[in-house]
Image (spheres, rainbow, N blue to C red):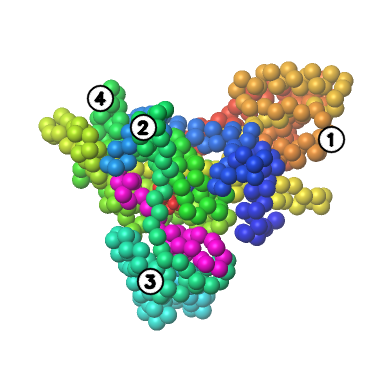
């Protein structure tokens, strides 16, 4: 059944809560804005996504190793990285709705609307002209398209200039000139645009006079940069090589209205790849392609991914793009791929006074490596999988079911073991199967309620296989295995269950797809 896009997010949020995936943080105190807790099924899914990333990065690339750096870092780290001075977002309030927005996002949304208009013009013309339609020619000559294109280019240039110069007056003028209205109140009654630093700070030390202001890391990358030489020397790594890390990051986000898409405490999976200066563009292209393959191998649908090149580059980058995903709110950033030049290592060298260089024995010289970064939000991966897996289905018998078609190796529970009835020795037989499987696969045992009801509950958490023990089991040692997606049942001998399900649930099934 097709679900309206705006309803989809709502349905996913309530489903995630009802079935133990995601709860609002400290809910008994009415929650905490943009902070969420992962429940019993959410934690499993999250761990499986981590495993998929970690294995891909560190097992399939023999020149990438993983670390786990602390969240707290010396405060000078954030001076060197530019976060103290430049990790700001332009903030603006609408006086009527009392809602707060990021001014740059409002402008980007306006640009996206213009792009959509061009897309519609092209579609209309393609229909009208049929096979003789020349897309390039149309884009280069159609007066309406040219007008939109010019407006997009102008707006991008003004946005880039205003953000680059931190000119909040120019940002406000841009909002006014584009006649951007608040999507909630519909008015253009905006406050001035102000800069807002996104880092959370706290104090370290027990005595007030000894306290030091420190920050909760806003990205995991800096823990990798400050350990660059530690890892390179102790691991005897040769350039090019990468360091991967999964960990929490914290940002005091201005707008936090999109469930786990934008949180104030979230998790990143980042990899910094150190290369010879001059080689960075080759590696940038390599990682763009490689990361896209990783995403697509999940099988959520290739059409749900696209690249989005950055026009407004961050202070550290000489090229950057996002891999966007078609979330319930539309195409948005899922992962960032950035060519960070030697900005970070050079800056840490300057602030720490320690050399952060690599001796290249082939070139017989030392240099500060360039860096290509891949950075994907674990929570956004979670949302992408949950929202595309969520399916409401009408069945041939007229009943309905909600099924999470989570990629099988990532499902929180892999097998449900269900005795048909709670007597005649069936529970005992089912427990024997469970005890055999539990070392390799996350199992769930349940004997309460009618079998159909139990199947529905497993569909709702995305369990790919249900093993049902019935009276026939006692006579011929066979059980049925029910497939979540097709709902078909197959009778197999108990001895075959273990090898068959282990093979079907292995994360290697997805990893091998990328390698091919
Ligand atoms: P955005 O433009 O959406 O604010 P960003 O460009 O600031 O994101 P990066 O600094 O490139 O994001 O961070 C890398 C990845 O971390 C993002 O692609 C995203 O998946 C994730 N991420 C960033 N901020 C958040 C957040 N507040 N909540 C959840 N995930 C986030």
- Dot 4: within a 10 Å radius of its alpha carbon, few (fewer than 14), some, or many (20 or more) residues? few
Mark 4 → mark 1, Cα distance in angstroms: 61 Å
Mark 3 → mark 1, Cα distance in angstroms: 64 Å
Q: Which residues are magenta?
A: 81-109
Mark 2 → mark 1, Cα distance in angstroms: 66 Å
Would you name the residue on which mark 2 appears? Answer: 209
Would you name the residue on which mark 4 appears? Answer: 233
Residue 184 placement: quadrant: bottom right
Mark 4 vs mark 1, foreground winner is 4
Residue 289 location (% of width, % of height): 38, 47
Q: Secondary structure at mark 4?
A: helix
82 drawn magenta: yes
Residue 376 placement, left or right of 183: left
Mark 2 vs mark 4, foreground winner is 2
Would you name the residue on which mark 1 appears? Answer: 450
Q: Earlier in the sequence, mark 2 or mark 1?
A: 2
Would you name the residue on which mark 3 appears? Answer: 173
Viewer-closest of 510 and 175? 175
Q: Please, is residue 398 above or below residue 425 in the view? A: below
Quarter holding the N terminus? bottom right
Res 277 visible? yes
Give the numbered dot on residue 385.
none
Viewer-closest of 423 and 123? 423
Give the residue at the far right of this rendering: 424
């Amino acid at each position: 059944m097709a679900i309206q896009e705006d309803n989809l997010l709502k349905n996913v949020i309530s489903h995630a809560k009802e079935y133990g995936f995601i709860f609002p943080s400290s809910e008994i105190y009415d929650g905490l804005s943009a902070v969420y807790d992962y429940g019993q099924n959410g934690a499993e899914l999250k761990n499986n996504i981590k495993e998929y990333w970690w294995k891909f990065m560190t097992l399939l690339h023999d020149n990438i190793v993983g670390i786990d750096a602390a969240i707290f870092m010396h405060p000078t780290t954030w001076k060197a990285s530019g976060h103290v001075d430049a990790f700001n977002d332009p903030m603006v309030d609408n006086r009527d709705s009392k809602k707060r927005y990021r001014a740059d996002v409002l402008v980007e949304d306006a640009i996206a609307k213009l792009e959509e208009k061009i897309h519609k013009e092209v579609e209309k013309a393609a229909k009208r002209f049929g096979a003789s339609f020349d897309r390039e020619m149309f884009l280069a000559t159609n007066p309406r398209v040219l007008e939109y294109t010019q407006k997009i280019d102008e707006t991008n240039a003004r946005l880039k200039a205003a953000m680059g110069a931190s000119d909040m007056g120019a940002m406000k003028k841009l909002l006014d000139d584009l006649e951007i209205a608040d999507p909630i109140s519909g008015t253009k009654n905006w406050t001035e645009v102000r800069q807002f630093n996104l880092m959370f700070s706290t104090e370290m030390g027990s005595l007030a006079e000894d306290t030091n202001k420190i920050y909760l890391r806003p990205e995991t990358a800096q823990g990798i940069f400050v350990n660059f030489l530690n890892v390179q020397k102790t691991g005897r790594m040769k350039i090019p090589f990468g360091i991967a890390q999964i960990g929490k990051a914290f940002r005091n986000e201005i707008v936090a209205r999109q469930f786990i898409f934008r949180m104030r405490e979230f998790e990143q999976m980042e990899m910094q790849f150190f290369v010879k200066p001059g080689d960075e563009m080759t590696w940038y292209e390599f990682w763009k392609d490689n990361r896209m393959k990783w995403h697509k191998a999940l099988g959520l649908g290739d059409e749900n991914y696209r690249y989005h090149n950055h026009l407004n580059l961050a202070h550290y980058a000489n090229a950057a793009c996002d891999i966007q995903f078609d979330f319930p709110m539309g195409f948005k950033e899922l992962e960032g791929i950035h060519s960070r030049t030697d900005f970070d290592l050079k800056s840490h060298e300057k602030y720490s006074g320690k050399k952060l260089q690599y001796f290249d024995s082939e070139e017989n010289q030392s240099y500060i490596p360039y860096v290509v970064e891949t950075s994907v939000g674990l929570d956004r991966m979670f949302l992408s999988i949950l929202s595309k897996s969520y399916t409401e289905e009408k069945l041939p018998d007229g009943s309905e079911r909600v099924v999470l078609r989570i990629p099988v190796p990532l499902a929180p529970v892999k097998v449900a073991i269900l005795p048909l009835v709670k007597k005649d020795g069936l529970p005992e037989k089912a427990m024997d199967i469970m005890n055999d499987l539990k070392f390799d696969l996350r199992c769930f045992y349940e004997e309460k309620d009618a079998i159909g009801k139990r199947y529905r509950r497993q569909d709702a958490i995305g369990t790919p296989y249900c093993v049902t023990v019935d009276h026939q089991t006692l006579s011929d040692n066979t059980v049925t295995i029910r497939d979540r997606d097709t709902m078909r049942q197959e009778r197999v001998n108990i001895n075959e269950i273990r090898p068959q399900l282990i093979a079907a649930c292995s994360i290697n099934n997805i990893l091998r797809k990328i390698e091919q």
